[in-house]
Image (cartoon, rainbow, N blue to C red):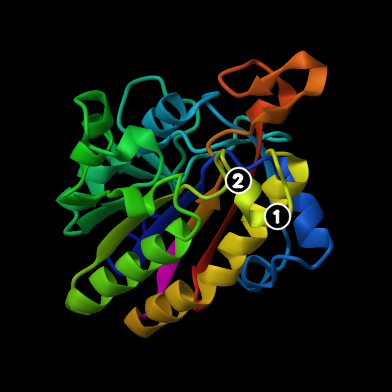
Amino acid sequence: MNRLVGTHDVVFITLDTLRFDVADQCFRQGRTPNFSWWFPGGWEKRHTAGSFTYAAHQAFFAGFLPTPVDAPGAPRLFAARFAGSETTGKETCVFDAPDIVAGLHGRGYHTVCIGGVGFFNKLTPLGSVLPGLFDESHWSPELGVTNPDSTRAQFALAVRRLEELPLAQRVFLFINVSAIHQPNRHYLDGAAEDSLASHAAALCHVDGELPRLQQALARRGAAVVIVCSDHGTLYGEDGFTGHRIGHPAVWTVPYADGIFPAT
Protein backbone atom coordinates (compact mmCIF):
# COMPACT_ATOMS: atom_id res chain seq x y z
CA MET A 1 0.00 0.00 0.00
CA ASN A 2 2.93 2.39 0.48
CA ARG A 3 3.42 2.67 -3.28
CA LEU A 4 -0.31 2.86 -4.05
CA VAL A 5 -1.54 5.45 -1.55
CA GLY A 6 -1.36 8.83 -3.22
CA THR A 7 -1.59 7.53 -6.79
CA HIS A 8 -4.71 5.32 -6.60
CA ASP A 9 -8.23 5.90 -5.40
CA VAL A 10 -9.15 3.64 -2.50
CA VAL A 11 -12.60 2.00 -2.45
CA PHE A 12 -13.82 0.08 0.58
CA ILE A 13 -17.19 -1.66 0.38
CA THR A 14 -18.69 -3.56 3.29
CA LEU A 15 -21.49 -5.97 2.39
CA ASP A 16 -23.24 -5.68 5.72
CA THR A 17 -24.15 -9.03 7.34
CA LEU A 18 -22.96 -11.21 4.43
CA ARG A 19 -22.01 -14.75 5.46
CA PHE A 20 -18.93 -16.40 3.98
CA ASP A 21 -20.71 -19.66 3.16
CA VAL A 22 -23.41 -17.86 1.19
CA ALA A 23 -20.93 -15.64 -0.68
CA ASP A 24 -18.73 -18.61 -1.54
CA GLN A 25 -21.65 -20.72 -2.73
CA CYS A 26 -22.99 -17.93 -4.95
CA PHE A 27 -19.52 -17.43 -6.43
CA ARG A 28 -19.13 -21.14 -7.19
CA GLN A 29 -22.58 -21.28 -8.75
CA GLY A 30 -21.80 -18.33 -11.02
CA ARG A 31 -24.54 -16.19 -9.49
CA THR A 32 -22.33 -13.13 -8.83
CA PRO A 33 -20.60 -12.48 -12.17
CA ASN A 34 -19.76 -8.85 -11.46
CA PHE A 35 -18.00 -9.55 -8.18
CA SER A 36 -16.31 -12.44 -10.00
CA TRP A 37 -15.06 -10.02 -12.66
CA TRP A 38 -13.37 -8.03 -9.91
CA PHE A 39 -12.20 -11.09 -7.97
CA PRO A 40 -11.96 -14.12 -10.29
CA GLY A 41 -10.29 -16.17 -7.56
CA GLY A 42 -13.36 -15.89 -5.37
CA TRP A 43 -13.75 -14.93 -1.74
CA GLU A 44 -11.09 -15.43 0.89
CA LYS A 45 -12.27 -16.83 4.23
CA ARG A 46 -11.40 -14.45 7.05
CA HIS A 47 -12.32 -13.70 10.66
CA THR A 48 -13.86 -10.37 11.53
CA ALA A 49 -12.98 -8.30 14.58
CA GLY A 50 -16.59 -7.72 15.64
CA SER A 51 -19.88 -9.56 15.71
CA PHE A 52 -21.99 -6.54 14.75
CA THR A 53 -21.67 -3.48 12.56
CA TYR A 54 -20.42 -0.84 14.98
CA ALA A 55 -17.69 -2.94 16.56
CA ALA A 56 -16.48 -4.35 13.24
CA HIS A 57 -16.27 -0.97 11.52
CA GLN A 58 -14.47 0.67 14.42
CA ALA A 59 -11.84 -2.04 13.99
CA PHE A 60 -11.78 -1.69 10.19
CA PHE A 61 -11.26 2.07 10.33
CA ALA A 62 -8.43 1.52 12.81
CA GLY A 63 -6.75 -0.66 10.16
CA PHE A 64 -7.86 -4.06 11.42
CA LEU A 65 -9.56 -5.52 8.36
CA PRO A 66 -10.76 -9.14 8.63
CA THR A 67 -7.92 -11.51 9.53
CA PRO A 68 -6.87 -14.37 7.19
CA VAL A 69 -7.92 -17.62 8.86
CA ASP A 70 -4.71 -19.39 7.79
CA ALA A 71 -2.33 -16.48 8.47
CA PRO A 72 -3.54 -14.43 11.45
CA GLY A 73 -0.18 -12.68 11.73
CA ALA A 74 -0.13 -11.50 8.11
CA PRO A 75 0.85 -7.84 7.62
CA ARG A 76 -2.08 -5.48 7.32
CA LEU A 77 -2.76 -3.13 4.40
CA PHE A 78 -3.21 -0.10 6.66
CA ALA A 79 -2.37 0.72 10.24
CA ALA A 80 -2.65 3.60 12.65
CA ARG A 81 0.73 3.79 14.32
CA PHE A 82 1.01 2.28 17.79
CA ALA A 83 3.84 0.61 19.64
CA GLY A 84 4.10 -3.16 19.60
CA SER A 85 1.98 -3.87 16.52
CA GLU A 86 2.86 -7.36 15.28
CA THR A 87 0.96 -7.05 11.99
CA THR A 88 2.54 -3.85 10.69
CA GLY A 89 4.95 -4.82 7.91
CA LYS A 90 7.27 -2.91 5.62
CA GLU A 91 4.54 -2.66 2.96
CA THR A 92 1.82 -1.59 5.40
CA CYS A 93 0.71 2.00 4.92
CA VAL A 94 1.10 3.42 8.43
CA PHE A 95 -0.59 6.66 9.44
CA ASP A 96 0.19 8.95 12.37
CA ALA A 97 -3.53 9.32 12.85
CA PRO A 98 -6.28 7.79 15.01
CA ASP A 99 -7.85 5.98 12.05
CA ILE A 100 -7.24 5.26 8.38
CA VAL A 101 -9.89 7.76 7.26
CA ALA A 102 -8.01 10.62 8.90
CA GLY A 103 -4.77 9.10 7.67
CA LEU A 104 -5.88 9.09 4.04
CA HIS A 105 -7.27 12.61 4.42
CA GLY A 106 -3.83 13.66 5.61
CA ARG A 107 -2.33 12.17 2.45
CA GLY A 108 -4.57 14.36 0.28
CA TYR A 109 -7.60 12.09 -0.14
CA HIS A 110 -11.15 13.39 -0.12
CA THR A 111 -13.05 10.92 2.06
CA VAL A 112 -16.65 9.97 1.26
CA CYS A 113 -19.01 7.79 3.29
CA ILE A 114 -22.24 6.41 1.84
CA GLY A 115 -24.09 4.88 4.75
CA GLY A 116 -26.51 2.02 4.84
CA VAL A 117 -27.50 0.43 8.15
CA GLY A 118 -28.50 2.39 11.25
CA PHE A 119 -25.00 2.97 12.60
CA PHE A 120 -24.46 5.33 9.65
CA ASN A 121 -27.80 7.15 9.68
CA LYS A 122 -26.65 10.30 11.56
CA LEU A 123 -30.04 10.46 13.32
CA THR A 124 -28.49 10.04 16.78
CA PRO A 125 -25.11 10.79 18.36
CA LEU A 126 -24.23 7.08 18.09
CA GLY A 127 -25.30 6.98 14.45
CA SER A 128 -23.02 9.94 13.76
CA VAL A 129 -19.75 8.49 15.11
CA LEU A 130 -18.69 6.45 12.05
CA PRO A 131 -19.86 8.87 9.33
CA GLY A 132 -18.31 11.70 11.34
CA LEU A 133 -14.85 10.37 10.45
CA PHE A 134 -15.29 11.43 6.80
CA ASP A 135 -15.04 14.71 4.92
CA GLU A 136 -18.54 14.10 3.63
CA SER A 137 -21.14 11.52 4.57
CA HIS A 138 -24.53 10.61 3.17
CA TRP A 139 -27.55 8.79 4.52
CA SER A 140 -31.28 8.82 3.88
CA PRO A 141 -34.05 6.21 4.24
CA GLU A 142 -33.60 5.54 0.52
CA LEU A 143 -30.14 4.12 1.32
CA GLY A 144 -31.26 2.04 4.30
CA VAL A 145 -32.32 -1.51 5.03
CA THR A 146 -36.05 -1.03 4.43
CA ASN A 147 -35.75 0.11 0.80
CA PRO A 148 -35.56 -2.81 -1.67
CA ASP A 149 -33.76 -0.49 -4.12
CA SER A 150 -31.20 0.74 -1.58
CA THR A 151 -28.20 -0.64 -3.49
CA ARG A 152 -29.20 1.12 -6.68
CA ALA A 153 -29.56 4.36 -4.74
CA GLN A 154 -26.24 3.90 -2.94
CA PHE A 155 -24.29 3.13 -6.09
CA ALA A 156 -26.00 5.94 -8.04
CA LEU A 157 -24.96 8.40 -5.33
CA ALA A 158 -21.41 7.02 -5.37
CA VAL A 159 -21.23 7.41 -9.16
CA ARG A 160 -22.49 10.99 -8.95
CA ARG A 161 -19.91 11.96 -6.34
CA LEU A 162 -17.10 10.27 -8.28
CA GLU A 163 -18.10 12.17 -11.41
CA GLU A 164 -18.33 15.50 -9.57
CA LEU A 165 -14.86 15.27 -8.04
CA PRO A 166 -11.85 16.27 -10.18
CA LEU A 167 -9.91 13.38 -11.71
CA ALA A 168 -6.75 14.70 -10.08
CA GLN A 169 -8.35 14.50 -6.63
CA ARG A 170 -7.66 11.15 -4.99
CA VAL A 171 -10.74 9.70 -3.30
CA PHE A 172 -11.36 7.30 -0.45
CA LEU A 173 -14.87 6.00 -1.10
CA PHE A 174 -16.56 3.91 1.58
CA ILE A 175 -19.95 2.26 1.03
CA ASN A 176 -21.83 0.26 3.64
CA VAL A 177 -24.21 -1.84 1.50
CA SER A 178 -27.43 -2.37 3.45
CA ALA A 179 -29.41 -4.75 1.23
CA ILE A 180 -28.19 -8.06 2.67
CA HIS A 181 -29.04 -7.06 6.24
CA GLN A 182 -32.48 -8.13 7.38
CA PRO A 183 -35.14 -7.66 6.14
CA ASN A 184 -34.02 -9.32 2.89
CA ARG A 185 -37.07 -11.47 2.08
CA HIS A 186 -38.18 -9.01 -0.60
CA TYR A 187 -35.34 -10.21 -2.85
CA LEU A 188 -36.80 -13.72 -3.06
CA ASP A 189 -40.12 -14.06 -4.86
CA GLY A 190 -42.85 -15.40 -2.60
CA ALA A 191 -40.73 -15.40 0.57
CA ALA A 192 -42.66 -14.68 3.76
CA GLU A 193 -39.60 -14.49 6.02
CA ASP A 194 -35.85 -14.01 5.85
CA SER A 195 -33.74 -17.11 5.21
CA LEU A 196 -30.41 -18.22 3.82
CA ALA A 197 -32.08 -18.32 0.40
CA SER A 198 -33.22 -14.70 0.62
CA HIS A 199 -29.80 -13.76 2.03
CA ALA A 200 -28.25 -15.20 -1.16
CA ALA A 201 -30.86 -13.51 -3.33
CA ALA A 202 -29.95 -10.16 -1.73
CA LEU A 203 -26.28 -10.69 -2.58
CA CYS A 204 -27.19 -11.49 -6.18
CA HIS A 205 -29.28 -8.33 -6.30
CA VAL A 206 -26.28 -6.27 -5.12
CA ASP A 207 -24.12 -7.94 -7.76
CA GLY A 208 -26.59 -6.94 -10.45
CA GLU A 209 -26.28 -3.28 -9.48
CA LEU A 210 -22.46 -3.29 -9.43
CA PRO A 211 -21.51 -2.57 -13.09
CA ARG A 212 -22.44 1.10 -12.98
CA LEU A 213 -20.08 1.65 -10.05
CA GLN A 214 -17.35 -0.42 -11.69
CA GLN A 215 -17.58 1.67 -14.85
CA ALA A 216 -17.44 4.94 -12.92
CA LEU A 217 -14.32 3.82 -11.07
CA ALA A 218 -12.67 2.75 -14.33
CA ARG A 219 -13.27 6.21 -15.80
CA ARG A 220 -11.28 7.75 -12.93
CA GLY A 221 -8.28 5.48 -13.44
CA ALA A 222 -6.61 3.00 -11.11
CA ALA A 223 -8.13 2.12 -7.75
CA VAL A 224 -7.46 -0.21 -4.86
CA VAL A 225 -10.75 -2.02 -4.18
CA ILE A 226 -11.44 -3.82 -0.90
CA VAL A 227 -14.72 -5.69 -0.41
CA CYS A 228 -15.69 -7.66 2.68
CA SER A 229 -18.44 -8.37 5.13
CA ASP A 230 -18.42 -6.92 8.62
CA HIS A 231 -20.04 -10.01 10.18
CA GLY A 232 -22.40 -12.82 9.32
CA THR A 233 -25.82 -13.60 10.74
CA LEU A 234 -27.85 -16.60 11.84
CA TYR A 235 -31.15 -18.02 10.62
CA GLY A 236 -31.91 -20.45 13.41
CA GLU A 237 -28.61 -22.35 13.53
CA ASP A 238 -28.06 -23.78 17.01
CA GLY A 239 -31.19 -21.97 18.12
CA PHE A 240 -29.89 -18.47 17.33
CA THR A 241 -31.21 -15.77 15.02
CA GLY A 242 -29.36 -12.59 14.09
CA HIS A 243 -25.84 -11.51 15.08
CA ARG A 244 -23.88 -9.97 17.97
CA ILE A 245 -23.46 -13.64 18.84
CA GLY A 246 -20.20 -15.64 19.18
CA HIS A 247 -20.88 -18.18 16.44
CA PRO A 248 -18.68 -19.33 13.49
CA ALA A 249 -21.28 -18.19 10.96
CA VAL A 250 -21.06 -14.70 12.46
CA TRP A 251 -17.27 -14.47 12.84
CA THR A 252 -16.38 -15.96 9.45
CA VAL A 253 -16.69 -13.47 6.60
CA PRO A 254 -15.78 -13.14 2.90
CA TYR A 255 -12.95 -10.81 1.90
CA ALA A 256 -11.32 -9.79 -1.38
CA ASP A 257 -9.06 -7.00 -2.61
CA GLY A 258 -7.36 -6.01 -5.84
CA ILE A 259 -6.06 -3.20 -8.05
CA PHE A 260 -8.21 -2.19 -11.01
CA PRO A 261 -7.22 -1.84 -13.76
CA ALA A 262 -4.45 -4.31 -12.94
CA THR A 263 -1.00 -2.71 -12.77
**Quick one: 106 or 152, which is closer to the camera?**
152
Report x, y in % for residue 46: 66, 38
**Quick one: 201 or 56, which is closer to the camera?**
201
Return the residue at label 1: 188
Q: For the point 79% across and 23% down, which residue is it? A: 237
Question: Would residue 132 be found to the left or right of residue 59 on screen?
Answer: left
Residue 84 in view: yes
Return the residue at label 2: 184
Question: Would residue 193 be found to the left or right of residue 179 on screen?
Answer: right
Say which element carries label 2. loop
Please identify the quarter of the rendering in which residue 58 is found: top left
**Quick one: 238 or 161, which is closer to the camera?**
238
Q: Residue furthest right?
A: 29
**Mark 2 residue type:** Asn
Report x, y in % for residue 234: 70, 28
Q: For the point 77% across and 47% down, which residue is it? A: 197
- Cα separation, mark 2 vs mark 1, equals 8 Å
Query: Magenta span covers which residues?
Result: 221-225
**Mark 1 residue type:** Leu
Q: For the point 70% across and 42% down, which residue is it? A: 192
Question: Would residue 162 be found to the left or right of residue 64 on screen?
Answer: left
